[in-house]
Image: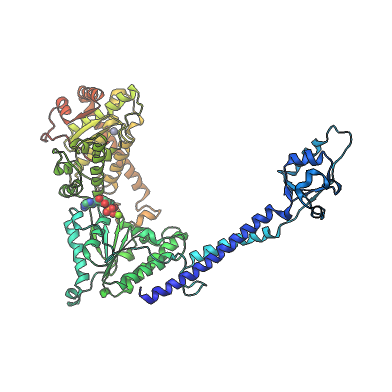
Amino acid sequence: MNDAQQDNRKTGRSRVTRWVIWIVALLLVNIVFTYFLARNEGGYKEISWHRFKDNMLRARDVDRIEVLNKEKVLVYIKFDSLKKKEYSDLGSLTKKAAGEPQYYFTIGSVDAFEKNMADVFTGDNEKYEPPITYISKSNSWQTVSSWLLPLGLLLLFWFWVSGRGSALGSGAAAIDFSKSHAEEYGESKTSPFTFKDVAGYEEAKTEVMEIVSFLKQPGNFTKLGAKIPKGVLLVGPPGTGKTLLAKAVAGEAAVPFFSLSGSEFIELFVGVGASRVRDLFDRAKAKAPSIIFIDEIDTIGRVRGKAVSIQVNDERESTLNQLLSEMDGFDPNTGVIVMAATNRADILDAALLRAGRFDRHIYLELPNKEERNAIFKVHLKPLILANDVDSMFLAAQTPGFSGADIANVCNEAALMAARQKKEAVEKKDFFDAIDRVVAGLEKKTKIITPAEKKRIAFHEGGHAVVSWKLKHVDPLVKVSIIPRGKSLGGAWYLPEERQIITRDQFLDQLCAALAGRAAEEVVFNEISSGALDDLEKATKQAYSMVMKLGLSDKLGNISYYDSTGTYESSFQKPYSEATAQLIDTEAQKLVQDAYTRAKGILTENRDQLDAVADKLLSKEIIYKEDLEQILGIREGTESLQQVAGKTGA
Ligand code: ADP
Ligand code: MG
Ligand code: ZN
């Protein structure tokens, strides 16, 4: 913004401020008037019902009464009586006799008032009751103000909402909704993050840095006729550091960096989103070379026109359209690059992803062991650690954790150590923190009956024994019957990080998942509700084996998986009714076979199951070593240390 523009905006703003002050002042005057007029109508005095009843009515001084608007009683005193000492509070006599009421009091309801009046004289011989008239009169000020108030408020609201070019001339509004609130990093404010804060992701960093170098030395690229990319999309599951990486780019790039979240475009007011996009690009172009970063772009970039159109969708659509046209609108070599981040690239509108827009995608996946190690190192640095803490060891315990999970574990561990007033954070604190992140808080207070406890012990024991006997199930680390979060117990495995799972591995996993319920049936001859999570997992896995992965006998090598997401929104299934039935029977068969197999293993090894359950009942948590004592060394595994993995239950 240059100086002239700035001045212009300022005068515009002060003009609007003046208007607002005027309106507020008018409203205030109005309210004050209304208040006083209502209080002090004609200057007569307010009295209590008791003074009226005892000193005026019973004294027979009342000439007549008027009930005004069913809420106020105006009292006219007889002219002769006004001389009495009782009425000396009224002041001079002439004023008193001006045909105006001298006193008033307020009543709750007319009915109650009439009843009270009648009660005053019950029992009196001589019937006396002053004449009562009912009148209704509206206060003109009150009427006017009841109009003015909403009108004024409306006007005020309108000034707030309307943007530039309102009826007030060239100025801006008191609060300009059409401006984007993008946070700007640049000369005045630098991002606190650099690439040092982002552990791992070397490829991603190199790629983003390359883009920054496009910006800084465009000549090197344009010389050969290449176009600088316009858009870069960071894609990855939540917590993998997309936002962090973008902020680090802001810190490293040393060019102005405009950062905002997709949801900030969408407001209550229609048309705001589009004008914010426009404003954002204007600002960025004025400062080129520069970077725009739109976080959570899926809030505006969803596939258009699929959902039933309601207002919000229209607004989002026009915002998206504006974004698309802005991205087309600038010449690739103006030096503005748009970065965006999302967890859900699959739901983004294809128009956003096409060449010339966000055509570069950088995938941030869940970190592998090495990367987790590096992330742990970053987050362990600020902590005071005991000697037994080793980042590589922690990385091994946390397969499937995202960067955010790891940051969380480190913080939880430090909190736990602090709570116990330790000098340093120990390995045990990290274990507890990992368990807590995986399964939730220990619920020591949850009330469990001994019978339930026994059932849980056999259920978990079933998982333990069966998974011990199956070759392809991940190594078991520990089994617990302490309730945690929503679950009543759990078995912890150390998942191997594999990219491909074979059919036999799937079948073994199914069998281990159903072993809890199988144990309940074998031991108690009765099954329970406690296997919900297991059944859900098994069912999902069976269906995905049949429908997606082509792993069933009858259906064969067919996959109804749809990576483009088109079927998801259509009501028609891509297969016939007969196939649907086949899918169901195949999935059921997989689950049924696995269950039978689990029951077989458990019946065969009933003594071992009993031993494991007994041990669980006495110790509540048992580790690999305890299991080895009962079940023998597991085939094909060297003795691992006690470790935990993210897939519990
Ligand atoms: P996303 O935007 O992908 O959902 P964030 O960027 O908000 O995730 O990451 C959340 C937090 O997780 C970060 O603030 C940081 O503490 C931690 N984190 C994630 N990835 C990393 C990483 N590679 N190195 C260091 N910390 C990370
Ligand atoms: Mg984020
Ligand atoms: Zn279970």
From the viewer's perspective, is 314 left or right of 347? Answer: right
Image quarter for residue 323?
A: bottom left
Figure coloring: rainbow
Task: Classify 212 as above or below 559.
Answer: below
Taking depth in this image into account, of 225 and 123 the one nearest to the observer is: 123
Q: Position of residue 560 (x, y in %)?
A: 30, 52
Residue 647 seen in this snapshot: no
Task: Classify 524 as above or below 324.
Answer: above
> Measuring 30% from the left and 41% from the top, which residue is drawn there?
587
From the viewer's perspective, is 117 left or right of 632? Answer: right
Q: Position of residue 336 (x, y in %)?
A: 28, 70
Residue 448 seen in this snapshot: yes
> Measuring 26% from the left and 40% from the top, which residue is drawn there?
415
Q: Position of residue 194 (x, y in %)?
A: 21, 58
Q: Position of residue 393 (x, y in %)?
A: 15, 41
From the viewer's perspective, is 475 left or right of 24? Answer: left
For the N terminus, the quadrant is bottom left
Taking depth in this image into account, of 293 and 622 the one nearest to the observer is: 293
Image quarter for residue 254?
A: bottom left
